[in-house]
Amino acid sequence: MDDMDQYEGMEMMDEEGMMMDEEGNMMEMDDADLMDDMDDDGRGFGEDESLNFDDNPEFAHMSPLDRMRKIRRAIIKTINDLREGAGSANICIDPNANRAASEYAMYLLENELENQDKLVEICKNNHVVGDVIPLVGYALLEEEEDHQGTLHDQMLDAHGLLLELEETSQVLQDKANNHIGIGFAFSKTNVKVVELVAEKALSVNKLQQSEDQGIEVRGTMLNREVAIYAASIVTQSKMDKDIKAVDPSNI
């Protein structure tokens, strides 16, 4: 049986706002019934159409806009407000962890109990580096559609549960935890929000080709007791084997 068969009737949202149907195919948000009522005031994606990035060749080299960015942005704001009150720096988004969190959220729609081994497998497949602390929020969807809010509201409610619980709230505001991946999945009966929290020594802000045909990496060290001495370039399929080592003179 295909791995995606078990998720029939469920939808997963990745960091590009794409959703996977029961056959494992990707479909646009606009094709999903539960997204039909989303509007443009923080609950929809109308502003993307006005920018028209997809049809502008000038932006053809850029990655698609994150269609879930409004919900993620709202969640990140609540987390950073919480962290500010605790004297912690703002938390950083990990795009790879976003993908892993969405995949794990979909897994949890079918499997009520959390599975650490499955989470480790998913994180490895999505190239998430280091250990993560999984936080899972959920919201139940009412049968009467007229009595329930938008999907955006339901996802924020699921996240709000993590802010209310002392144990998960402490994880989110811990100074040591400085990276997060946020994923979403839903069925006709409930919404899952997974937040993968991690501690990392640095944050990478930009990765691009340099003028001398090298690789330019820009970021910030988050731990003042750690510095970069050397680096290595690897392929995603074989990350334990160096293609090229980068010595200190080139950093």
Image (spheres, rainbow, N blue to C red):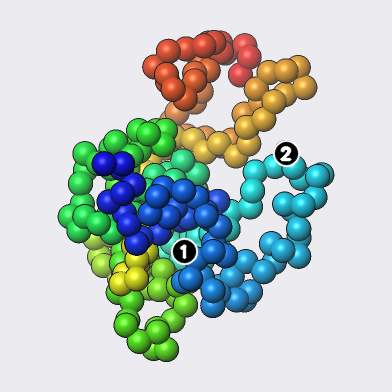
How far apart are labels 1 and 2 at the CA level? 29 Å
| Above-or-below relation of 74 to 61 | below
**Which sits in the foreground, 125 or 226?**
125
Compared across the picture, whether 45 is left or right of 55 comes to left
Q: How many marks?
A: 2
Q: Amino acid at mark 2?
A: His
Q: Nearer the N terminus, badge 1 or badge 2?
A: 2
Label 1 close to label 2 by CB (< 8 Å): no
The answer to whether residue 219 is visible is yes
| Above-or-below relation of 149 to 231 | below
Residue 92 position within the rendered picture, expressed as x and y whole percent measured from the top left: 49, 48
Of helix, strand and loop, which one carries label 2?
A: loop
Q: Amino acid at mark 1?
A: Ile
Res 244 quadrant in image: top right
Residue 230 position within the rendered picture, expressed as x and y whole percent measured from the top left: 51, 16
Q: Residue at x 50, y 44 (%)?
A: 95
The answer to whether residue 84 is visible is no
Query: According to the image, label 1 marks what residue?
Result: 75
Residue 118 position within the rendered picture, expressed as x and y whole percent measured from the top left: 25, 41
Res 226 quadrant in image: top left
Compared across the picture, whether 171 is left or right of 223 comes to left
Question: Which quadrant of the rendered structure holds the C terminus?
Answer: top right
Q: Residue at x 72, y 38 (%)?
A: 61
Query: According to the image, label 2 marks what residue?
Result: 61
| Above-or-below relation of 219 to 59 | above
Estimate how packed mark 1 is, as few (under 14), some (14 to 19) or many (20 or more) residues with alpha carbons within 10 Å.
some
Residue 166 position within the rendered picture, expressed as x and y whole percent measured from the top left: 25, 65
Estimate how packed mark 2 is, as few (under 14), some (14 to 19) or many (20 or more) residues with alpha carbons within 10 Å.
few
Q: Residue at x 43, y 61 (%)?
A: 79
